[in-house]
Amino acid sequence: DAGVIQSPRHEVTEMGQEVTLRCKPISGHNSLFWYRQTMMRGLELLIYFNNNVPIDDSGMPEDRFSAKMPNASFSTLKIQPSEPRDSAVYFCASSLVSRYEQYFGPGTRLTVT
Amino acid sequence: SQELEQSPQSLIVQEGKNLTINCTSSKTLYGLYWYKQKYGEGLIFLMMLQKGGEEKSHEKITAKLDEKKQQSSLHITASQPSHAGIYLCGADRDSNYQLIWGAGTKLIIKP
């Protein structure tokens, strides 16, 4: 298995622009997580999907952030409009079931100038 | 997360030496997960511990969960440059899916 796939690996954008991050979980996994990692705050859970349904989005910073999972093999995290404070590494992770170990993608390093 | 304390924050060890990293919670844990992260890369799953007193090993890395299921240690024997990176512990404390995370321990191996 190729593991969790994320794209792009790096994204540099200007403040105010829309940013879309993509994730393909491991085939057969029914849980998907979006995380944000920064030096100041460490690893933060943004949203969790189970069987393509958003279960908890309480970690999403504000309305500028939205996430979708239209099918079991694809998810997106969108930021609109982006702000410099959104600069971070965004990870997608998937697990076979919600309580099992999570497998992380390589991350997307987002820089908003 | 301050709910899960990792120590030390950073560690510089001479190649070949042993080392231990700790992860402590004030509450009983359902499960404890150890991950390793290299700069610019994602987290790599190392081991999961669920039972009090459980111990698991993979190559030269051994992780233990204490009987009370509130503290875990990660021990590396005869450290190598390939062990360098950031080690994070994650834990679930109840029936919730959500893991809480330690702040990480940065490990540097001196040749």
Image: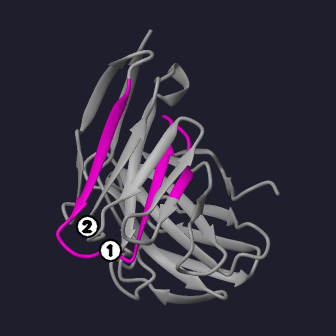
Please indicate whether residue A102 sits to the left or right of residue B2 in the image: right
Q: Is residue B67 left or right of residue B80?
A: left
Q: Which residue in the structure is indicated by mark 2? A: B70
Circle 1: element type: loop
Which residue position holds label 1? Answer: B29
Type of amino acid under label 2? Gln
Residue B33 location in percent, x, y? 45, 61
Q: CA distance from mark 2 to mark 1?
A: 6 Å
Along the viewing direction, whichever of A13 and B30 lies nearer the viewer: B30
Residue A52's image quarter? bottom right
Q: Looking at the figure, which quarter contains the N terminus of chain A?
A: bottom right
At 26% from the left edge and 67% from the top edge, which residue is drawn? B70
| Labels 2 and 1 touching (C-beta < 8 A) | yes
**B71 versus A46 height, above or below:** above
Where in the figure is residue A31, as x and y percent of width and height? 61, 79
Q: Earlier in the sequence, mark 2 or mark 1?
A: 1
Q: Which corner quadrant holds the C terminus of chain A?
A: top left
Magenta segment range? B18-47
Tell me whether marks 2 and 1 sit on the same chain: yes
Q: Secondary structure at mark 2?
A: loop
Q: Is residue A15 visible?
A: no
For image coordinates 62% across by 69% down, the residue present is: A94
SS majority, magenta: strand
Q: Position of residue A63 (x, y in %)?
A: 38, 79
Q: Chain of mark 2?
A: B
Tell me if I can see residue A49 in this picture: yes
Binning the other alpha carbons within 10 Å of mark 1 as few (below 14), some (14 to 19) or many (20 upward) gives: many
